[in-house]
Amino acid sequence: MVGRSRFSVWTIVAPLALVGVFALAVMLVRDALDQPPAAADPVPAAAAADGAETAAEEPVTVGPDVPPSYKIRKGDTLSAIAERYGVTEDYIRELNPGLDPLALIPGERIKLRDSA
């Protein structure tokens, strides 16, 4: 009686293919992690220079509905506070030097409008 061999080409090719796919996936992930994130909206150098000069000189206008200060609540973020009152995060940081936007303390008061 002639028996079939327990081994075929696929017993060698299948594991090699699996190792190859795994190695390719590792290389793609490493490559993606090594590359810097792409800019969302690239600005030409000349336009960026012009915009930087005018943006620094423009005063921020604050609406009359913005209170002079805000008491930080648990879960607040600087970006959420800025959006709620229609001001920028940079403006709030300018009014509150030493404020760490990543470590807001509930109960702490921050300025939302300039006293001048």
Image: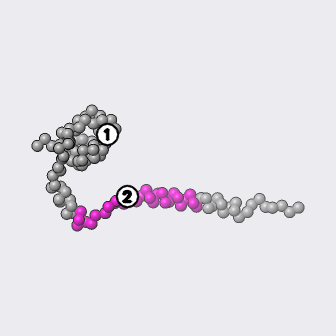
Q: Can you give x and y, in whole percent of width and height, for residue 114 in the image?
A: 15, 43
* Residue identified by numbered label 1: 76
Quickly name the residue at label 2.
Answer: 37
Q: Residue at x 64, y 59 (%)?
A: 15
Figure quadrant of the C terminus: top left
- Do the residues bearing badges 2 and 1 touch, measured as CB atoms within 8 Å? no
- Is residue 89 shown left or right of residue 26? left
Figure check: 71 above or below 88: above
Question: How is the structure coloured here?
Answer: one colour
Residue 58 pos. (x, y %):
16, 55
Q: How crowded is mark 1: few (under 14 residues within 10 Å), some or many (20 or more)?
A: some
Category of crowding for the residue at label 2, using alpha-carbon neighbours closer than 10 angstroms: few (below 14), some (14–19), many (at least 20):
few
Q: What residue type is labelled 1?
A: Asp
Q: In which quarter of the image is residue 34?
A: bottom left
Pick the residue in front: 95 or 60.
60
Magenta residues?
Answer: 20-48
Residue sticking out furthest to the top: 107
The numbered mark, 2 or 1, whose residue comes first in the sequence reads 2
In the picture shown, does residue 82 fall above or below 15? above
Q: Quadrant of residue 45?
A: bottom left
Q: Disc 2 versus disc 1: distance between alpha carbons? A: 27 Å
Asked whether the viewer can see residue 18, the reply is yes
In this view, the residue in front, 23 or 83, is 83
